[in-house]
Structures are given as structure tokens and as C-alpha cells.
Image (spheres, rainbow, N blue to C red):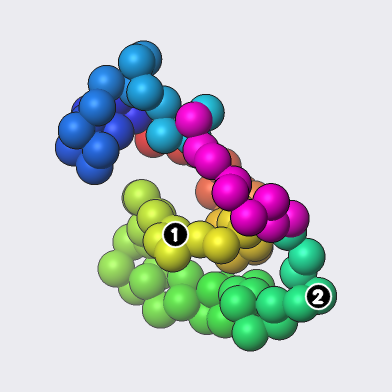
Amino acid sequence: FKELHLELFAKDPEIHHVVQNFSNPYDIRPNFKNYPHSNLLPEFFTEILDILHMEGMPRFIVEVGSLHGHSAIQMATVLDKLQMTEVP
């Protein structure tokens, strides 16, 4: 994590941790009913994993462009059901 944090933000996470220091100036709260277009469907992610299965399955998954993190939660739920719970 430290290496990735340094590479992405050019700051030591022990001094400036991007997650712990995250600001929410608009005080936006997650509401998944208002953003149906941003939800990653579990079936779609499962289809992607089925395609990747021929290549040996992914070892590292990154979700980018997160608004509330719902897609990341959906992916983690699917991965848990497939017993792919190991985190690098």
C-alpha cells in the first residue's frame, strides 16, 4: 500500500493518508437508489470473470472512478461467493 500511495499521491501515507484525510465538501451521502446507472451488476462482473477464467483468473482487481464504492462492493461480493477472498 505504501508504495502505491507514494506513486499515486507523491506523499507518505503515514504523514498524509489519502483515505483518512478524504474531505467531503458537499456532504454527499451514498444513496444507491438515486444512481442506478452507476451500479455494476453482479451478473455482468460474473460474465467478465468467466471470460478471464480461460486466462487463469485475475490476481489483482482495481475499481476506478468510485463515487460511493458500490461497484467495488458488488465485485467483492461476487469474488467472495467464488471463494476468491485472498487479498494481495
Left/right of residue 53 with respect to residue 83 in the rendered view: left
Residue that numbered label 2 is attached to: 33
Left/right of residue 47 with respect to residue 51 in the rendered view: right
Please give the label number shown on residue 31: none
Location of residue 29 in the rendering, given as x and y in whole percent from the top left corner: 74, 55
For discs 1 and 2, the disc positioned in front in the rendered view: 2
> Which residue is at a point 51% across and 38% down the rendered structure image?
22
Considering the image in quadrants, where does the C terminus appear? top left
Upstream in the sequence, badge 1 or badge 2?
A: 2
Q: Is residue 5 above or below residue 80?
A: above
Q: Nearer the viewer, residue 86 or 72?
A: 72
- Element class at badge 2: loop
Location of residue 10 in the rendering, given as x and y in whole percent from the top left corner: 19, 33
> Which residue is at a point 34% across and 29% down the rendered structure image?
1
Query: Mark 2 packing: few (<14 Cα in 10 Å), some, or many (20+)?
Result: few
Judge whether residue 78 is colored magenta.
no
Q: Main secondary structure of the magenta part?
A: loop
The CA span between labels 1 and 2 is 20 Å
User: Which amino acid is tagged 2?
Assistant: Lys
Q: Nearer the viewer, residue 73 or 85?
A: 73
Q: Which residues are magenta?
A: 21-29
Left/right of residue 22 with respect to residue 80 in the rendered view: left
Among all residues in the image, which is located at the extreme front?
A: 25
> Which residue is at a point 73% across and 59% down the rendered structure image?
30
Residue that numbered label 1 is attached to: 63
Q: Is residue 66 above or below residue 16?
A: below
